[in-house]
Image (cartoon, rainbow, N blue to C red):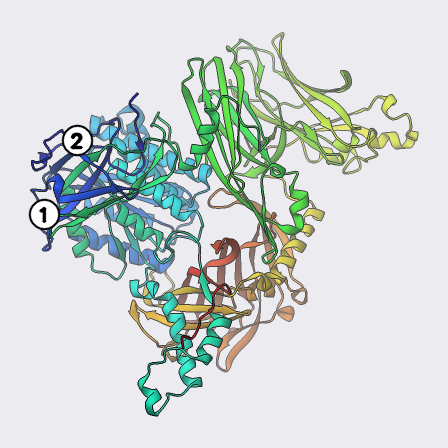
Amino acid sequence: MRRFVALLAVILLAPLAYPQTTPATTSQNPSIITNVDEVTLDLVVRNKKNGPILDLKPEDIDVSESGSTVKLTDLRLVTGQVGTDHLVTLLFDRLDPSAATNARDIASKILKVMPASGFSYSVMNVYGRLQLFQEFTADRTAIGKAINTATSVESSDKEKSSEAALPEKQIIAEAQTGADPSGARVSANERSVAQVILAALQESQRIVQDQHAQPALAGLLALARTERKISGRKIVIYFTEGLRSDPNNRDMVRLIAGAANRSGVSIYVINKDALDTRAMQGLTQSAVVGAVRLYNIQNPQPTGPAAQIPVPYGPGMITMENSLIDRLQSDGLDEKRDPLVDLAADTGGAFIASEDNLKKPFQQLVADLTTYYEASYIPANLDFDGQFRPIAVKAVREGLKIRSRSGYFAVPPDTGTVVRPFEAPMMKALAEAQLPAEPKFRSRVLRLGDLPGGDENELVVEVPVSELETRDDVNSNLYSLHGSIMGQVKNEAGAVIEHFSEDVPRHGSLDSKASAQSDVVTMQRHFTAGPGEYVLEAAVLDRNSGKVSAQRVEFEIPNATSGPSLSDVTLVQRMIPTPPDVDSEEPMRYGSGKVIPDLSGRVAHGTKQISFFFLVHPDADAKEPPTLEMEILKGGETVTQVPLTLRTTNGPVSVPYMASIQSGTLPSGDYSVVERLTQGGKTAEHEVAFRVEGPELAHATEPGGSAESAASNGDAVTASDIPSSDLSSEREEDQKAHRVVITTLPAGTVPAPSADELQAIIANARKRALDYAKTLPNFVCVEVTNRSVDAAGNGKWKHRDSLAELLRYHDNEESRSTLEINGRRSNLQRAEMNTSWPLSVGEFGAMLNLVFQPSSKTEFEYREAATREDRSGTVQVLTYRVLRDNATITLGQGSDQVGVGFHGLVYIDPATGGVQRITMQADGLPKTFSMSAAAMTVDYDYVAIAGRDYLLPVRSTVSLQRHHKAIELNEITFQNYRRFASRSKIKLLQ
């Protein structure tokens, strides 16, 4: 049987057969066709003078896959006229003020370099997800306005989303109706392109959720995938300040490159913070040079015959090196290269520093779009193992310069869903006759009923943390786990109708590891499906142990019935904050949060309350209002049966509902809850079972002390005595404390932590902050500072200069040496620069100490729960204030200094106690002082170095405002972390 290798890394253009001794055939209009048994890649072939080669033969090149030469089956020359319409997407990352100004200038220069005709441009940014500001157009004026809007730093994220709403509404209208919002018809091609853009907007949001990817990478992957439906080659020009440190970046970049190559998308990266290549490659050398200087000081040049013998190293240098720079360690594939450099090269684009000349690469872009070759071959290995298979193309004929794609991921055929490389082991497990059962997990489909989008259901897979292997790091006081989850739904014919997956890395504090064993890792996705019989296939991969398990669960979606109805009822594990613009169609959204179900059916003894979630579907045709009641049963006997308040709705509106039992009143044992909806003489009900674990008799008191206090938190509270048989050993006066209290929870924000929980969060964060410096290894990194000034304070930023330094962190002390100033190698130090240099108070622990040290007497208040940008977890946001009398921060230069108080926000990861972000604003600056305002922000993230994860600063901003309104801004990034270790020594050769 012939098999199709679904490639995430090659352009699939249907080749034509030809005799291998003849030159390649020529095509002006290649069609995109999915072929079997073939890998197809495109080649840009030039001579030494960069002129196109038009007579390439198969014997002129050598193509290898995974190191083994392959035999070409097809080769053809593709030519086209510049006049054809090529699509270019201008994609802007989240940019700081000076970077945004710079990006606008560069975009304007690019538009001037590109031909006046034959190109259409769209404008997008990635603020949380892909946002559209201009659909494809050749109107340069419209493009310019969209660029200004997309890169505006004066607008908040909310305002940007509002500004993107209009073009997105237009795209939705064109994609769905074939007409713009005014009703004017659009062409079939315009509608097709609109559908692709809409799919990209939706896909980017899904990728952030599924893979916890940085929004920029999710946006690039979404564009790379969806633009496959547009024929011809496409261009994405990505403006960025560099990627946030993330151990998964390189795999993600390869995935983007593969999808881009398959879709004919070339990616050009414009990096505002790109260092000179020599500086990046010379990172280790720079550190060694510093040591050599010390050696020369400690060991004067020899005289006499010894002076003839070169001695590059000596005892002084060796001692210094072994104690300070024994070995530079890093993780990943070729860490000396920025992943974005590989992304550009692997997709046929270019990586361009913002100071580079733009003319040459974009003239090359135009030439590459019009003349290139396609080569095809049958791979020797047809196994879908999910592995990356590198492709190399070498010139056999002299004088050829060849650029091609880097390779592909071998994953199963494209069946309408995207199969990611990490899913390959789980797909294999589902194909086994006997499904593996370790690690254990639970899976279910919740049937939610008829909603505006159709018959909605929620696929839920949860994995107990206790089933996953953890890796402990006592130095950083962290443990880590890494699980991958996949779920798909098949219909009666065995066809996959829905496919979902999620890759979940997680960190936690070693101090909380024991209590975290009761937690779960959950993947949930909603989908629509009509009535019928289905099968849920779910699988889990423990990335640390390599263990894989799988399940199959049959379920049925029944035919809709007339009258009122209820969805399935589920226990609630927790709620997470969900921004309103993120998956607004999620059926398990409750207020501003999303409900995470609990499939275990078990409640720990002492749990304060048990919550249940379900959807109420009133009968739109009934004249009588619906009534809702809740019944609790223990051992088949009714404990209590009470009515619940049901909000009035207009028309056939489904109502999300959450009710809570104050579970401290329930003795241990097996229970069930029945929700019952009655309207127009018809009744619908659903039941869920659960067990309260613990001793046979629970001696707990009702949280809050009374039904009245519980009532203040909801719409309705009712109470009923537990049967006396369960309370026979209790004194009569104690029985009042064991009343079942049922509360209808309001659909508001995600519940705030209690006072005790908040104090625990603060105490954990304080311990972590004060110990932070002790957890850091000795390391080096590249610190890049861009300085800008807003002379009038009106948001018009002017870039002043940039500085790239090698930062050494050794035994909790920082030292810096200059690598570059304004893109050129330099040894000039900060103190030697002739302008003021507003410095931070210390990203590596000092700022955290200022806020959390007991002597600061910091006042904390809870603000909200927030979702991380990559959707990988939630953080608790607290406000804080330190009074001037307790502060130890001083601002100023020279004799012009003053002590100040300060306030700001801290974003705390409750699982680790680590601070993910901290902001600081100075208070009480005297009117006579040279500064009228000062502020600082530091972002922290996990950086993998030598197999260990460290919470390190990745980004920082410092701003100072003078009395004459000028604002000075330092935008700082920390890149290319390397760790000093002691696994190797420098030996002196005698």
Q: Is residue 548 left or right of residue 611?
A: left
| Whether residue 125 is situated above or below residue 20 in the rendered picture | below
Badge 2 density bin: few <14, some 14–19, many ≥20, Cα 10 Å: many
Q: Residue furthest bottom?
A: 304
Q: Is residue 629 left or right of residue 906?
A: right
Pointer 1 with pointer 2, Cβ within 8 A: no
What residue is disc 1 on? 52
Question: What label sits on residue 800 in the rendered view?
Answer: none
Q: Secondary structure at mark 2?
A: loop
3D distance between C-alphas at marks 1 and 2: 20 Å
| Whether residue 600 is situated above or below residue 683 in the rendered picture | below
Check disc 2 and give the amino acid type. Answer: Pro
- What residue is at 26 percent from the left and 36 percent from the top? 263
Q: Position of residue 827 (x, y in %)?
A: 34, 76
Q: Residue furthest top?
A: 681
| Whether residue 263 is situated above or below residue 343 in the rendered picture | above
Asked if one can make out residue 16 in the rendered structure from this viewpoint, the answer is yes
